[in-house]
């Protein structure tokens, strides 16, 4: 998300670097480029106009502190204003009511409502330790009820059945009684969508809202529809007392106009953003972290939180004990590390959250890809257990067999073995006192992390001092 906007803004803000003071003249070109970048990102025109005026007003004559140069001062102003238009801070769900807390999900057909219901159920179960029940009041879309039943089973939420011949309000009221009986903490109600906003749809969802009196009414919107997303959200907000927005399909949106416009147009907070089709792809929306990513500053906090949730701590502990006992880091350990990286969204997903990685040359970006890691996993899977544990056994004939079994070339097997050796040396250094510093010096040898031109070509903020 935001790739094109981030690239455009990075180019625009470079023009300010080196100026002694921020004046109307020397920021005019940069502001013009920022304005074009936001419009190309499909942000709503009124939002863009207000954003530019606010940045100009704060930047003109801004005193440059000793800690920041004019370019950095201007970037900080842009960053702070981006945070402001997206909502200033994360707005968490309000579940402070007598259980079950009802969450009503609204949105157009195809926005990703049903998938978001399952994602939210999983998030509440895993992170909030809530007992969650889900029900579908969508009696119009074929297989909508069956889809939610399947997803509920996947995330281990309680599924309350419904039928296409029932009235939506009857379904909702019966589901509330059932959720009460089952002592559920939260009941998530999936409602029907339409291809466009219409009076019949609004009347139905208003009657559902009146009957259920949900503590949270969330509007799910497809981020790829840009400023249309904000306009649709406003139409729903005029008809319903929305409490928040969920931006779905953000991984398919390189522009980011919806995130920049929805809060300003509706006045309602963006509470979550959906990423991908998997049920773990829902994240709380943090405006400050997203603004940092837009400006190429990374999002290290989210990366750390993701590692806390998704890294297998038992495996990590076993590996640490193995290294401390003096045993070698073998190919099975290497395979585990590749899997852990994949669980965290792959190398590209991780790099997206690291500061300065957006400024990498295209040649370097081309070298950093998840396909290389997948191929390495296939090669390791084609080895025998003995070969994985004792890589030195792998001679010419074994390499040929492994290459044939994995559909790769002998050169790919050789490359994997070389990268494993480099990783093995790094892990040995980490297991010693002061090993982390040694490991950072060895990062250039990591698979897929070779930077053209060596360490000197690493982006600002990533260079060793």
Image (spheres, rainbow, N blue to C red):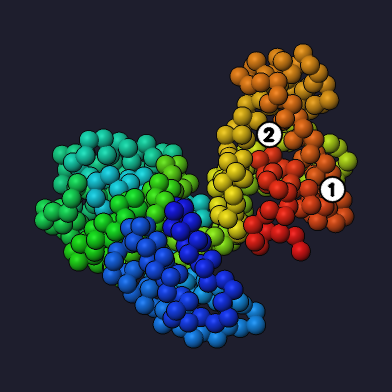
Q: How crowded is mark 1: few (under 14 residues within 10 Å), some or many (20 or more)?
A: some
Lateral position of residue 169 relative to residue 96, left or right: left
Give the numbered dot on residue 429. Answer: 1
Q: Position of residue 86 (x, y in %)?
A: 40, 67
Q: Nearer the viewer, residue 180 or 143?
A: 143
Compared with 414, 117 (above or below) is: below
Which corner quadrant of the image does residue 98 belong to?
bottom left
Q: Residue drawn at (47%, 72%), measured in percent from left and top?
A: 78
User: Element at badge 1?
Assistant: helix
Q: Which of 295 and 120 is in front in this view?
A: 295
Q: Where is residue 396 in the image (x, y as percent from the top left)?
A: 79, 16
Lateral position of residue 36 relative to residue 381, left or right: left
Tell me which label, 2 or 1, sits earlier in the chain. 2
Which corner quadrant of the image does residue 370 belong to?
top right
Q: Which of marks 2 and 1 is in front?
A: 1
Compared with 90, 174 (above or below) is: above
Q: Mark 2 points at which residue?
A: 335
Residue 250 in view, yes or no:
no
Q: Position of residue 368 (x, y in %)?
A: 61, 42
Q: Which of 222 and 417 is in front in this view?
A: 417
Dot 2 and dot 1 residues touching (CB under 8 Å): no
Lateral position of residue 124 relative to residue 49, left or right: right
Give the numbered dot on residue 73. Answer: none
């Amino acid at each position: 998300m935001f790739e094109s906007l981030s690239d455009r803004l990075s180019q625009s803000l470079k023009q300010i670097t080196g100026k002694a003071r921020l004046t109307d003249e020397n920021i005019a070109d940069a502001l013009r480029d920022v304005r074009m970048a936001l419009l190309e990102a499909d942000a709503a025109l009124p939002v863009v106009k207000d954003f530019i005026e606010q940045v100009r007003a704060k930047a003109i004559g801004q005193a440059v502190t000793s800690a920041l140069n004019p370019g950095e001062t201007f970037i900080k102003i842009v960053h702070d204003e981006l945070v402001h238009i997206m909502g200033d801070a994360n707005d968490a769900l309000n579940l402070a009511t007598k259980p079950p807390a009802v969450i009503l999900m609204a949105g157009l057909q195809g926005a990703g409502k049903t998938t978001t219901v399952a994602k939210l159920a999983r998030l509440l179960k895993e992170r909030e330790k809530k007992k969650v029940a889900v029900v579908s009041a969508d009696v119009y879309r074929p297989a909508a009820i069956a889809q939610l039943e399947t997803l509920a089973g996947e995330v281990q939420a309680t599924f309350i059945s419904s039928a296409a011949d029932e009235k939506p309000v009857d379904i909702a009221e019966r589901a509330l009684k059932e959720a009460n009986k089952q002592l559920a903490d939260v009941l998530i109600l999936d409602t029907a969508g339409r291809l466009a906003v219409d009076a019949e749809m609004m009347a139905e969802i208003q009657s559902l809202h009146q009957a259920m009196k949900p503590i949270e009414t969330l509007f799910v919107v497809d981020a790829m529809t840009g400023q249309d997303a904000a306009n649709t959200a406003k139409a729903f907000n005029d008809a319903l007392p929305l409490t928040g927005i969920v931006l779905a399909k953000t991984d398919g949106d390189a522009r980011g106009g919806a995130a920049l416009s929805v809060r300003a147009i509706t006045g309602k907070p963006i509470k979550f953003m959906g990423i991908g089709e998997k049920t773990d792809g829902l994240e709380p929306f943090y405006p400050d972290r997203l603004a940092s990513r837009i400006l190429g500053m990374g999002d290290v906090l989210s990366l750390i939180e993701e590692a806390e949730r998704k890294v297998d701590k038992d495996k990590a502990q076993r590996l640490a004990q193995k290294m401390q006992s003096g045993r070698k880091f073998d190919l099975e350990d290497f395979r585990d590390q590749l899997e852990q990286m994949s669980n965290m969204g792959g190398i590209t997903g991780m790099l997206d959250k690291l500061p300065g990685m957006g400024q990498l040359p295209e040649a370097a970006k081309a070298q950093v890809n998840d396909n290389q890691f997948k191929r390495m996993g296939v090669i390791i899977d084609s080895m025998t257990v003995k070969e994985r544990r004792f890589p030195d056994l792998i001679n010419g004939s074994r390499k040929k067999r492994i290459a044939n079994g994995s559909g790769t070339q002998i050169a790919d097997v050789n490359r994997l073995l070389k990268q494993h050796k480099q990783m093995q040396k790094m892990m040995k250094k980490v297991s010693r006192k002061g090993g982390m510093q040694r490991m950072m010096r060895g990062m250039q040898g990591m698979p897929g992390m070779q930077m053209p031109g060596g360490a000197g070509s690493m982006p600002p903020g990533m260079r060793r001092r």
